[in-house]
Amino acid sequence: MIKTPGDVKTYKKDLKRALSNTFLGATLDAFASAYPASRANAFSGIDFEALAAEIARAKDESIPNLEKLLEEFTVQAQKAGAVVHFARTAFEANSIIASIAEENGVRRIVKGKSMTAEETFLNDHLERSGYEVTETDLGEWIIQMRGEGPSHMVMPAIHLSRREVAELFTKVTGQAQDPDDIGAMVRVARSELRRKFLEADMGISGANFAIAQNGAIGLVTNEGNGRLVTTLPRVHVALVGVDKLVPDVKSAMRILTALPRNATGQLISTYVTWITGAVECKSAPGSRKSMHIVFLDNGRLALAKDPVFSQALRCIRCGACANVCPIYKLVGGHNYGHVYIGAIGLVLTYFYHGRQNARAIVRNCLNCRACKSVCAAGIDLPRLIKEVYGAILEVEGEKPVKNVLLEKTLGNRRLFHFLLRSGSHLQAPVAEGRFLRHLPLIFSEEHQFRRLPALAKVPLRDKWEKINPVTQNPRYKVAFFGGCLTDFVYPEQGQALLDACRDLGVRFEYPMEQTCCGLPALMMGEKETARRVAVQNIKAVDPAEFDYVLTLCASCGSHLKEYVNLLSDEPLLGVKAAQLKDKVIDFSSFMTKVLKIDPSQFLAGGGKTAYHAPCHLCRGQGVREEPRELLAIAGLEYVQTKDEEVCCGFGGSFSLDFPEISAELLKRKLDNVAASGTGALVTDCPGCVLQLKGGMENRGGAIEVKHIAEIVAERRK
Amino acid sequence: MVEQESTAKFAERARSAQTVVVEAKDLAAVFEYAADLTLQQGGQSIAAPGIKGKELAHLSKLCQAKKIELLTGDLRQKADMISTGLTGADWGIAETGTLVVDSKSEDIRLAGMLCDTHVAFLKKSRIVPDAGTIEKELSRMMKTSHGYTAFISGASRTADIERVLTIGVHGPRELHVLILGEDKQ
Ligand code: SF4
Ligand code: SF4
């Protein structure tokens, strides 16, 4: 029923359609704006990071033992009169449920909301087998009647307007419905569905928990339909992914603390129902419910053994990773997942619904890490998304041209840097000041949303010896990691670093064998190339020789810190990677925390300045206060703008692959900055500078865009 | 002290989920409250499957006097007739304003699900700071064969149409919690 395009071209058409859907845009924007505050409110007094870490730890303990937990659960549940089934595949699960229906002479079925049943397309199967199936969660009922899949794991009909619902209900009831009277429409659902509950022979639910210790399942709902589904019909079937097994009540309660708070900003959902075995049911023979629990494997037990992907099984399906995703916010769940939605959907689709459904959507990620920062189970979602992308490229064996080029050039520093230098000469005819006049032919109309910078005439590395002052008796010996953009596009940022630190007792070195940090390779799913350049950089910059390794690029910095993941299985390099992680530092932290600069070293009375927080600095490295503090010390008036920590849309090669999305994110970012009435916008990543400056130039350049090092250098006395 | 604090917090949190929280002197006061509320809302019946013995006799007399039909069992047959569901609660969890209701009995479940208004009474001494405090008791409740343990935090709600919060989609439209002080003698 649901279709997710397997080719990027069709997928992009869908994205375009979604981007022009103004209702969707406004609704998702309203939700995304309201969500952070209500979430923060719900978690007040709770240390979220510690809770997520605790959930992750407990899940990691259970995941290798799922089979054991299943055994324990089965013994307990059967003691309480439930029948426990195990389905290896989705088809098997559907067949088991259909035969339970048949054995019990069932005709009508009511269903509570279950993502696992969506995963197996259970409704289709049962309907084909001749059963009447009615979804009873309001949102699910609406999309069932429209023949759609959910567009959010917790709010399945968030993509629909009241008007669309009113039209649908008018058709269903044969009576005109007023779209502005939502209360009345909810009453229609109540009475229509109440009838269905009373007539049904079988209720199907999912479960948020299956507790091994006592054989109970737990259901979390707001509407109360889950209670009716499990109470009124004489047969109850719960379809549960094996990953929902938890050892004990304590583990379940821990997850329950996070789930509703993270999902909808509620302290708790209205109804949490714990069911053990065959409960009393007066319409069933012997007044005992016929109770079945069907556990679904569908690849989960194998996933549990995967060293990289097993953490995907920690997911508690709160949907928060979609709530905060800047791309989800633009295009909605139908274009951002298959059955499972949001960041976790990009990962799970490959495992549960196959490569065809995953191959286009999995590319659509900025690596902005908003999802990772709110994940209730501490899953490294951006990393897993890239791993899936890499795995698909690997399996398909046919790589995009740019990947082949990247692999060939990036792996060889001399060649790579030779090409960059040649590029600077070749572009001469199309360069106009610091920008390119025309975009090279490989770009299309859609890439016109920002102006691309020209490559610098002389890269930083070629003038480094000349501009780097000799510091006598330095207090700090610091390696400067340039990164491609600072080195070849914005060498003036490197100059600014030296100016900002003038006479402060720092001796900088620029190890010449350093090369691209490798993040672009990882972004394109090229893990092997990423590894190769990581090794090259660790050889070039031995962290043991320096007090710090400073970079002006937030993306390089956060990626250098992640070399530990890439090189964890290399005994010696792994140690160096860990040392590197401890020494990498960003400009603002270095100035405020290490050099401890003070206002007396700066001119006073600077103008109003807005700040864009790079994803890879605020979330990637947890640096939030330092840049704002630095601006204040440097005599500038920092002005807060809306959505400061939302991605600018650059995402490296992402902005070339999905220019429409990149453009829209950039537009919103610049609109917010323009609304603040500042004269300057600073950020601490040359990638963000490229995006913001290019976009601002296209709008007439009213606001100056700079790297924070530049503005700070200008203010030095 | 802890009890006072927990009660205050319970009330605050429950109210934030639109629950009406009232203190009641004794069970008789609870019955009065439920009967008056039923009439006020134009209801005709009270389902009170968990009330037994002397107390049931008292409630029955009260309902008769006020011309309210009292339903005490077989609620499945009376699914469309329940105005007010009256049940006890076993625990109150202050942190989230949650009632814990042992709902093994089908009629207890139906009284709280099929009614328009749910009135639940809860002893003050049974209000605990958080779910962790009664973890053992919860485990025990779940462990009994054929267990059905309900956490209830407010009235039934949905936000599935344009995220507009709407109360009373499948279950009760109102939840009233009556907190009973302990009999000091
Ligand atoms: S990294 Fe950013 S763009 Fe990618 S899925 Fe997560 S939130 Fe969305
Ligand atoms: S991946 Fe994390 S944030 Fe996303 S639904 Fe699962 S638990 Fe929630």
Image (cartoon, coloured by chain):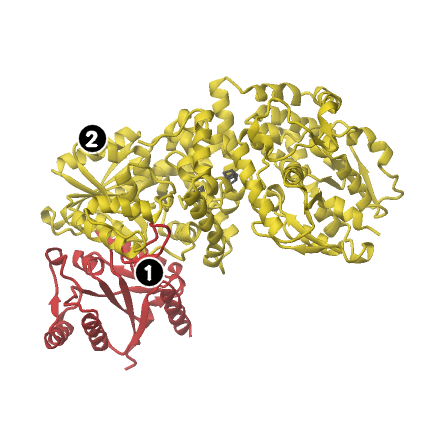
Residue A484 in the image: x percent, y percent? Answer: 70, 31
* Image side of residue A426 versus residue B109, left or right: right
Question: Height in image: A605 above or below A75?
Answer: below
Chain for numbered disc 1: B
* Image side of residue B77 versus residue A160, left or right: left
Residue A413 in the image: x percent, y percent? Answer: 71, 23
Question: Height in image: B92 above or below A525?
Answer: below
Chain for numbered disc 2: A
Residue to which mark 1 is pinned: B153
In the figure, what tint was chain B given?
A: red
Which residue occupies the foreground of this view, B74 or A629? A629
Mark 1: give few (<14), some (14-19) or many (20+) Cα within 10 Å: many
Task: Name which residue lies at 73% across and 33% down.
Answer: A434
Residue A232 in the image: x percent, y percent? Answer: 17, 50
Which residue occupies the foreground of this view, A333 or A500? A333
Cα separation between marks 1 and 2? 38 Å
Label number found at residue A128: 2
Which residue occupies the foreground of this view, A621 or A615? A615
